[in-house]
Amino acid sequence: MTTRVSPRQQGRSLVEEIGLKPADIKWRKKFLEFGDDDVQRIVKHQDLLKKLMPDVISEFYDHLLSFAETKGFFDNPEVLRHVKQAQGQYFQQLVEGHYEDNYIEGRLNVGKVHARIGVTPDIYLGAYRRYLNSLFCRLLDSPALEKQKGIETALSLMKLIFLDMGLAIDSYIDNYVKTIRLQTEAIRELSTPVLQLRDGLLILPIIGVIDSERANQLTETLLCKIHESDARVVIIDVTGVPAVDSNVAAHLMQTVHAAALMGATSIISGISAAIAQTLVHLGIDLGSIRTVSNLQRGIEVAEQYLHQSALDGDISSANTPESVS
């Protein structure tokens, strides 16, 4: 499969990669009713919140370690130490009042890392619920803060945390979309293998539905293989294709002509009665292309053509296998 360079490898930020714009973040904050008052309230009580942090984190990881489904992420004591330290840094950023570009990028990266190591969204959301429970209980029970102020601070934190969770979910979705895209591309490449039967002869067996995107990929794969192998004849077998439309038929013709420009003659095998009727109905003329009933017959014709061209010493003198008697 072709190696592709990710946007991150090209130096793009996660915000750019996912497609978030400043206006999107601004709207989210507005929708969550997270404003300057909330920021000021969190910053005002950040010393108290930081003081609560060690017990919150300790209780949080005790909870995670009590379930087999999450305990496995921390089998290595060094990993556990590292993630606790990272959690402390996360909490510091949560209460320091800076919620612009760097903060957004960091929160997106949290979701990306979780997705990469296999923390599913249900675990992420469930764990965060436990985290909030520990934090809010300690905040509301703190003698250093009157009850009403504690509630107001908790509500401000809730808005910010929902912003965080939304960003993490963005990263999850982006990761899933990229994974599906790569899998789809891999399946398409596997579903259109170009096989070299012998020197000078390629077979392209096409199976399944062909859409415009797959047709483009098919052409690219075939032409690359023709160039690599210096093929003289290509058999395009469509036995496994249930139907074609005008776009696919036109693209098939273009593929044949492109192959001819590279010095390869095409034979199309396995056209079904239904496809033949469709081509006639669409007015697609295959008269300039050699067609045969099945793959076996296609191989026989291709072998004759290669044999004849070897005797002639110049395959370019014959554009199509019709010249083979």
Image (spheres, helix red, strand yellow):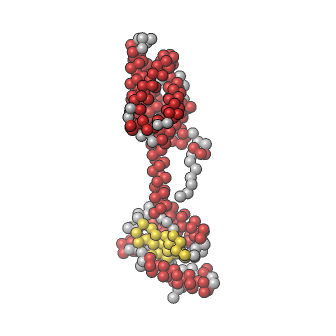
Q: Is residue 314 left or right of residue 71?
A: right
Q: Picture coordinates of residue 318 (x, y %)? A: 58, 82
Q: Is residue 204 above or below residue 161?
A: below
**Residue 71 in view, yes or no:** yes
Looking at the picture, does residue 106 appear above or below residue 236? Answer: above
Query: 14 or 131: nearer the eye?
Result: 131
Pinpoint residue 174: horizontal percent, then vertical percent: 47, 43
Residue beneath the point at 51% across and 70% down: 195
Viewed as shown, does residue 230 lie left or right of 34?
right
Q: Residue at x 56, y 84 (%)?
A: 307
Q: Residue 35 in the image: x percent, y percent? A: 47, 23
* Quadrant of residue 158 within the rendered picture: top left
Q: Position of residue 262 (x, y in %)?
A: 60, 71
The answer, for residue 23, to whether it is visible in the render is no
37 up-or-down from 24: above or below: above
> What residue is rendered at 42% in x and 28% in y?
62
